[in-house]
């Protein structure tokens, strides 16, 4: 559903004033640690990715060439319909989103739903990327994830 929709917020049985808001079928967004700016990502062994100062002793930067997992929501329908009320969901996106780290395309080997509303992307960190906090963005069906998200890299 795209376009304008009427919204009425009801609290404790009292309806507020109706207003219109834009609706769209997808609204891609990365999950982030602590409200941002670092994206929720893990190494293949499940340990957290981020600057060492994000969660001291628990986060380490991603490495060029490493395949890691990123988490997001709002990417829309997959090849398997969502089962209402089910605690488990699955299905893949086709095509996969285009993910860029530091402006460089990062190959996506898996893009799918792994839980209710939770997408996982298995991504290879570009080998030519520089060290430091790099901007990260995913584009899907013409829409992009939120601005200002970062991914930390260290050789």
Image (spheres, rainbow, N blue to C red):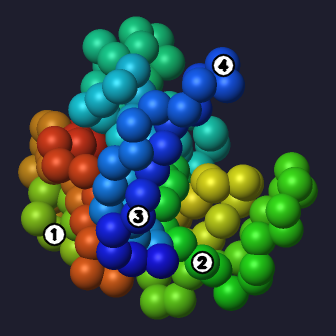
Q: Position of residue 97 (x, y in %)?
A: 39, 77
State yes or no: discs 3 and 4 in contact (Cβ < 8 Å): no
Determine the CA span between mark 1 and mark 3: 37 Å
**In this picture, residue 36 sits left or right of residue 66:** left
Picture layout, residue 41 above or below residue 38:
below
| The C terminus sits in image quarter | top left
Determine the CA span between mark 3 and mark 2: 20 Å
At numbered mark 2, what does the secondary structure look like: helix, strand or loop?
loop
State yes or no: discs 4 and 2 in contact (Cβ < 8 Å): no
The residue that label 3 is drawn on is: 5
Q: Which of disc 2 and disc 1 is earlier in sequence?
A: 2
Per the rendering, the mark at residue 104 is 1
State yes or no: discs 1 and 3 in contact (Cβ < 8 Å): no
**Residue 67 visible to an observer of this rendering:** no
Determine the CA span between mark 3 and mark 4: 23 Å
Picture layout, residue 69 above or below residue 107:
above
At numbered mark 1, what does the secondary structure look like: helix, strand or loop?
strand
Q: Which of disc 4 and disc 3 is earlier in sequence?
A: 3
Q: Which of disc 1 and disc 4 is earlier in sequence?
A: 4
């Amino acid at each position: 559903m795209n376009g304008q929709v009427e919204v009425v917020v009801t609290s404790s049985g009292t309806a507020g004033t109706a207003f219109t808001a834009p609706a769209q079928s997808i609204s891609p967004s990365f999950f982030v640690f602590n409200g941002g700016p670092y994206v929720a990502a893990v190494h293949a062994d499940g340990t957290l990715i981020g600057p060492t100062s994000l969660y001291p002793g628990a986060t380490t930067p991603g490495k060029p060439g490493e395949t890691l997992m990123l988490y997001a929501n709002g990417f829309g329908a997959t090849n398997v319909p969502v089962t209402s009320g089910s605690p488990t969901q699955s299905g893949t996106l086709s095509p996969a989103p285009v993910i860029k780290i530091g402006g460089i395309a990062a190959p996506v080997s898996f893009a799918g739903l792994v839980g209710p509303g939770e997408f996982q992307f298995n991504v290879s960190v570009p080998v030519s990327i520089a060290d430091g906090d790099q901007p990260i963005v995913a584009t899907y069906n013409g829409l992009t994830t939120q601005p200002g998200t970062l991914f930390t890299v260290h050789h």
